[in-house]
Amino acid sequence: MFYIFKKIAISILTIFLISIFVFFMFQVIPGDPVLAQLGIDGIGDNPLLAENLREAFEMDVPVVQRYVNWAVRVVGGDLGESFQFRTPVAELIASRLPQTFSLALTSLAAVIVFGIPLGIFLANHGHKKQGVIVSILSQIFIALPSFWFAILLIWIFAFHLNFGSMRVIIDWGNPANTLRDLTLPVAALSLGAIAIVARYVKASVLEQKNSEYVTVALAKGMTESQVMRKHILRNSLIPILTILGLTSVGLFTGSIVIENVFTIQGIGSLLINAINFNDYPLIQGIVLYFSVIVVALGLFLDMLHVLIDPRIKRGWK
Amino acid sequence: MKKTKNIFIAIFFGVFLVACGNAAVSDNMSAVGTYQNEQENEINRPFIGTYLSEFASIAPLGDNSASTREILRNMHDALYGYYPDGSLFLSLAEEIIYEMDDTFVIAHITLRENIYFHTGRTIDAWDVEYSFKRLAGLIPEIDTTQILAAGLFTNMLNGNPLDGFTPGRIEVHNEHQLTAYFDNNTGISAIRHQLADGVIVPRDYPEYLQQVHPVGAGPFKFVEHVPGDRIVFTRFDQWHRDLPEIIDAEFRLFTDPTVMTLAFQAGEIDILTVNDENYTAIAAMGVEIYEGLSNDVWVLYLNHLNDYFSDIRVRQAIHYAIDQELINQIAAGGRGAALHSHMSPFLTTYYNPNLRDMYPFNPERALELLAEAGFPNGFNANFRIVDNPQYHDIAAVVQAQLANVGINLGIESMPWGTFFPEVFQGRNFEVNLLNIVGFADASRILGRYLSTANGNISGHSHPELDRLILGARASADHAVAIEKYKEVQRVLAEEAVAFWTIAPGIMTALSPDFVGFRNYPFAFVDISIIRFAR
C-alpha cells in the first residue's frame, strides 16, 4: 500500500511541476493573444476593444498571480476559458476527447494485434527470407515521419484507390464507416509503433528462448508452442508491457500531427489551433491533459508490473 | 509455431479484406457521388469550398480572422456593396447623402423598399440603428469582446472624448430613413467603407442566437454549422439583388493544405488557392486558374530617425539600387507586380500609374546619390524581418542588391510575436520588411503615412503629405478625394518614404463545373457571382 501511495504522490508532484513549467514557458515565449485575434489594424482601429480583451484575458495581472489564479481554478476543476472560442477549456477538451481516444485506442489495438504476433514471428523466423523482409519493412516504418507517411497513405489509398477518407469524421453511430475512415490515420499513427513493439517482442522472446529453463522444458518433452505459450511469453511480458506503455504515450502525443493531416477534430488539432492563436488557457489545459495521460499511464504500468512481479515492490521498502 | 504464423496472417488479411469490403460500398465521397448523379440537373449541384481553421465565432463579425470572414461574408449585406475591384455601390441603401460640419460626418440614409432578413422580416431603419450600435459597443447586453471585426464603428459613434473623438448619434425618422452623425476624425472615405463592412442584422434576433444560427440579409442564408466539419448555406431567394446561380453551398474544414490540394484533384472540393507548391499539379489538371493581384504590399521600411535614412538621397539610392522585377520573379514567381508607391495596381480607382518611371533600376545612379550623401563607401545597417520563408526570399534579394552599392544589411529574423512589439511598436530597427495587408479603402491604406499615425513605422514627418491625406479624408466629393490620394502616392514616391517592393499575385482554381470567380481587395470567396459552367 505504501508503494502505491508513494507512486501516486510522485505522479501528483510531477503534474504540478509540469503545470508550472508549461505556464511559465508560455509567458516567456513571445506572442500576444490580442494581436493574434485582432491583427495590427484591428488593434489600431479599436484600442478600446484591445484593452477590453487584455483585461478579459487577465494580461494586466502579474504573471505569478495569474499562475496562482489558474492553479486554484484547476484544482477546483475549472481550466479557464479559451481566448479564441470563449468556451470553457474543459468543455472544449471534453468535446474533442472521443475523437482523440478513438484514434489513439484503435491505434493501440492495432499495435497489440499486429506488433506482438509480428515480434514472435520475427523471433522464430528472423534468419529466414520472410523474416529479413519484415525486419527491413519495420525499419522503414520506424524511420518514416508519421505526417509524411499519412500524406503518402492519403495519396495512395484515398486519392488513387478511392479507399478511406481524406477527412475523417468520427461518428460511432455509424461504426462501419468510422472504422473504415479510421484505417488510414490508424495506419499512419501505428505502423511505426507496430515496428517498434515487434522489435522489442522479438528481442525479449529471443532472450527467453536462450534461457536454460527453455532447454530443460524442451528436454522434458514439451512442444515448442507449449514452451512459447506457457513460459517464454509469460516471462517476456514485463518488457513488452513497458514498451506498450511508452508506445501508448507516443500514440496519444503523435495524434497531434495525424489529426491535423486528416482534419480529425480531436485534442491534437485543437492544440495546433490554440498555438496559432496564442490561446494560453487552451494550450495549458491541453498540455495538462497530455501530462495527466502520460503520468497516469506510467502509474498504471507500475501497478501492473507489481501485479505481475511482486518482487518489484520490495525495492521500494 | 506454424499455427501462430497462420493466425497472424489470417488476422492481417481478414482486417484488410474487411476494410476493402467496406470501401466497395463506400459513400465517403458523397460530394463527388452527388455531383456525378446530379450533373444533368446542375441547378441542384452544391458548391463545395473549404476553410483551414475552425471559426472562433460564426456570429456576424464575431471573428476577425480573414479565413472566417472570407466565407461568412456570403451571409451578409450592408448599406453599400463591393464590386470586385473594390469600388462601392449602394446595396441595402437606396441613397446616402453626406454633409460635414466641424464635428460630424452626417449621413442621411434612405433604405430600399422590399429588403429582407433571412427570417423573412423587412429590414427597416431601426435595424440599421441597432446594427451600427451593436458594432460600436452601444448595446449594453452585447459584450463588445464578442464582436472582434467591428472595424471603426467605435470611433465613429462611441469614441472617447479624451482621445479627441465626439460621440455620435443616430436619428431614425421613419422605417426607411435615418440620419447618422459619425465623428469626422474617421473621414468620409473610411466611413463609406465602414458602411460597406458593417453588416445589417435584425434587432429582434438575440445575440446568443447569432452565435449558433446567424441571420443576415445576404445572398446566402445559414443552414447548419457542424464544428470541426462544415458550414452549409442555401440561397436566400428574397435577396434584393440578382439571385446567385448556386443554390446550395458547403464549406468543409481541411486543416492540411496538401490534403486540400489532393481533395481538389479528386473532385471533393470546387475551389483551391494555388501556390508555387501545387501550381504544376493543378495546372496539369487543365482547370481554369484565376490569376490576380493581391492588395497586400511588401514594404521595405527605412527608419527616418536613423542618420543614414533621414537623408532623402540615401532613400532614393535604395530605390535605384533594387531591381523589383527580380524580387517579383524570386518571391512571387513573376505573378506579382512591381510597386512605385504604397498602392497595388489592383485598386485601379486609386492607383497612380504615372510613377512607374520615377526610379528605374540604375545602380550607378544609386552610387552617385550615396556619394553625394557622404557615403561613397556605403554603410552597414540591421535588417529586421519576420521569420517566414516569404520574408527570407525577398530579404535575400534586397540584401544582395544593396550590397552591390555598398549598403550591407545584416538580416535578423524573429518570430512575429517578437517583431510586433520590438520593431512595429518599438520602432527598434534600421531597415525592416513587412507585408502590409490591404484594404479596399485608400484612406486606410495611405492613412498610415500620416505623421501621427500608428502605422507610421518609418517615423517620417512631412507636412505636405499630412495636408494631402487629411484633405482627401475630409473631401465629400469622392472624385476629388481620388485625385488627392493619387497625389499622396506621388509625394510618397518623390520623398522615397519607404521602398515598396511588390504586390504578390493570387491564384485560385475552380473546378471545371464552375466559372466566374473574382478576387476582391480583401479576403472574400463570393459565391454569389460564381456560375455553373455551360
Image (cartoon, rainbow, N blue to C red):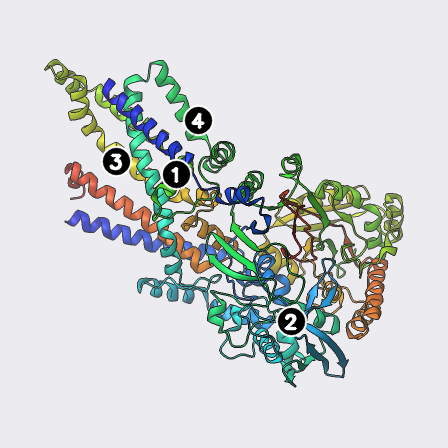
Crowding near the residue tagged with mark 2, few <14, some 14–19, many ≥20 C-alpha atoms within 10 Å: many
Q: CA distance from mark 4 to mark 3?
A: 24 Å
Residue at the spot of label 3: A241
In this rendering, which labeled residue sits more in front, label 1 or label 2? 1
Q: Earlier in the sequence, mark 4 or mark 3?
A: 4
Circles 3 and 1 in contact, beta carbons < 8 Å: no
Circle 3 marks a residue in which chain?
Answer: A
Q: Circle 1 is placed at which residue position?
A: A180
Quadrant containing the C terminus of chain B in the rendered view:
top right
* CA gap, disc 3 and disc 1: 28 Å
Residue tagged 4 = A140
Give the mark, 4 or 1, whose residue is nearer the N terminus: 4
Between tags 4 and 3, which lies in front?
A: 4
Q: Quadrant of residue B335?
A: top right
In the rendered structure, which disc, 3 or 1, sits on the residue that comes first in sequence? 1
Within 10 angstroms of label 4, few (less than 14), some, or many (20 or more) residues?
A: some
Q: Residue type at mark 3: give it.
A: Leu
Q: Quadrant of residue B24?
A: top left
Q: Which residue is mark 2?
A: B152
Confirm or deny contact between disc 3 and disc 2 (CB under 8 A).
no
